[in-house]
Amino acid sequence: GEDVEQSLFLSVREGDSSVINCTYTDSSSTYLYWYKQEPGAGLQLLTYIFSNMDMKQDQRLTVLLNKKDKHLSLRIADTQTGDSAIYFCAESIRYSSASKIIFGSGTRLSIRP
Amino acid sequence: GAVVSQHPSRVICKSGTSVKIECRSLDFQATTMFWYRQFPKQSLMLMATSNEGSKATYEQGVEKDKFLINHASLTLSTLTVTSAHPEDSSFYICSAREALGNTIYFGEGSWLTVV
């Protein structure tokens, strides 16, 4: 089946690193994404990783992919108050000649002073 | 970067009427567009996948006669909620995948309130 799971909440202190974890079930994933959603807003693509990669770094963001365990994580270094949002993990799955994206439930990241 | 525009961003309609939401890729061609629905404090639920020039593929449980999707060109897909009911009130988001790549970009979303 197609399922993407995330923990619902994460609270970190300002300046610390945040690590948001995600697990997925479909081994045919081609791309895995991290999206950010601020209150009342749409989705913002943060980063993505191809399924044959282990790691991708983009400024404060580091994505780690363990394909064997079907585990994806997003690390935000030096977390700031502006990072408060819901973070969605998503996987792109190919079926027939098309593909679709399945989202996790989202992890609400809150920053404490 | 690539931009996906959704219109309207907010709409209020009366029960029984139909409302159309547009999704446009502004600076790229999108062969595939996706429509999602988000209930309060919940994740995005994929409603349907539309490919330019062909019929949309609906996810299980989504009424295709109620949520009409048209993808008439490489830059425009529309979602029409027919005979709207208060239970259809939700946040609808579209996304578009570049024809030449695999990156998917999302629109800002449309808040639909049916009264």
Image (cartoon, grey):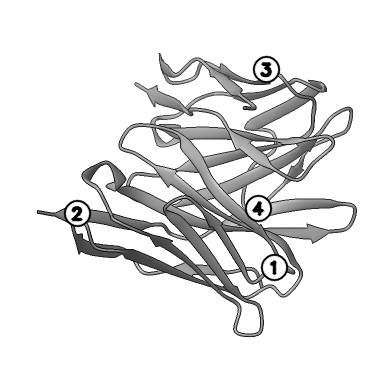
Q: Could you confirm whether marks 2 and 1 are on the same chain?
A: yes
In the image, what residue type sits under mark 1? Met
Q: Is residue A89 left or right of residue B97?
A: left
Q: Which residue is mark 2?
A: A111
Q: Is residue A110 above or below residue B69?
A: below
Q: Dot 2 surroundings within 10 Å: few (below 14), some, or many (20 or more)?
A: some
User: Helix, strand, or loop for circle 2?
Assistant: strand
Q: Quadrant of residue B53?
A: top right
Residue carrying label 4 = A101
- Extreme-left residue of the structure: A113
Front-lying residue, B65 or A109? A109
Q: Vertically, is A62 above or below B32?
A: below
Q: CA distance from mark 2 to mark 3?
A: 35 Å
Q: Chain of mark 2?
A: A
The crowd level at tag 3 (other Cα within 10 Å; few <14, some 14-19, many 20+) is few
The x and y percentages for residue B45 are 54, 49
- Please provide percent x and percent y for residue A68: 66, 84
From the image, tell me which residue sits under label 1: A53
Residue at (62, 75) in percent of width and height: A25
Between disc 1 and disc 4, whose residue precedes? 1
Residue A64: name its quadrant.
bottom right
Q: Residues within 10 Å of mark 4 (few under 14, many from 20)?
A: many
